[in-house]
Each structure stands twice: as structure tokens, then as C-alpha cells.
Amino acid sequence: MFFGTDFTDDTGGHRTMNDRMTEEKSLAWKVDAAFLKASYKVVQQAKEAGTPVIIWEDDQIKEIPADEMEMRLNVKRLEESRP
């Protein structure tokens, strides 16, 4: 073990910092995926109810039509999927 590059997990097994970083990336990916899924669900519910989606943007509360919010999410997803 050298300056925290190796550590013991809860089960007593040794893992490297690389293992830990991979797990954190995986967790971050899962969090992002869950947030995106929830966002689309909110948009769908707003469409069904005929209500806007309420967001915080530019230091203020804004009402965004559900169709526009869906378009914003799609654009963001496309931008993030580019290498």
C-alpha cells in the first residue's frame, strides 16, 4: 500500500484506486440515467395533464411547455452522446 493507492473494502478484499474510480463512474452513470428517465416521466405527465414543466433556470423559476422541455432533453441527450 502506497499513499492510499490500495485500500480494503467492507469485505476485507483489496481493491485499487482504479477499481474505485470505475465504480464511481458507473454510479455516476446510473445516477444520470435515473435522472434522465425521471425527467422524461415528468414531461410525459405534463403532456397528459396539459400543464407546463416548472424548472429553475437563469436564477428564476420558469414554466416551460412540455413539448419544448422534451425537445431540450432530446438535444441534451444528443449532445452528451457525441464523442
Image: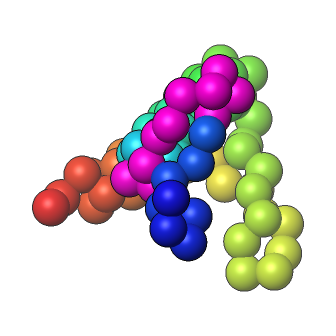
In the rendering, at what x and y percent does residue 29 appear? 46, 41
Magenta stretch contains residue 7: no
Foreground pick, 18 / 64 = 18
Seen in the picture, residue 23 relative to 58 is either above or below; the reply is: above
16 inside magenta stretch: yes
Q: How many numbered marks appear?
A: 0
Q: Is residue 68 above or below residue 13?
A: below
Look at the picture and state if 57 lies above or below 11: below
Residue 81 at x, y = what percent?
24, 51
Check the image and report above or below for 24 versus 30: below
Residue 35, position in %: x, y? Answer: 60, 38
Q: Is 52 positioned to the left or the right of 68 in the image?
A: right
In the image, 54 versus 6, the foreground residue is: 6
Among the 4 quarters of the image, the one containing residue 79: bottom left
Residue 45 percent location from the top left of the image:
68, 22
Q: In the rendered image, is residue 51 in sight?
A: yes
The residue depicted at 75 percent of the width and 57 percent of the height is: 55
Whether residue 39 is visible to the viewer of this picture, yes or no, is no
Q: Residue furthest bottom?
A: 58
**Image quarter hosting the C terminus:** bottom left
Kindly give the residue lying farthest to the front in the view shown: 1
Q: Residue at x 81, y 80 (%)?
A: 59
Q: Residue furthest left?
A: 83
Q: Residue at x 78, y 65 (%)?
A: 56
> What range of the chain is rendered magenta?
9-18
What colour scheme governs how the chains and residues are painted in the rendered image of this protein?
rainbow
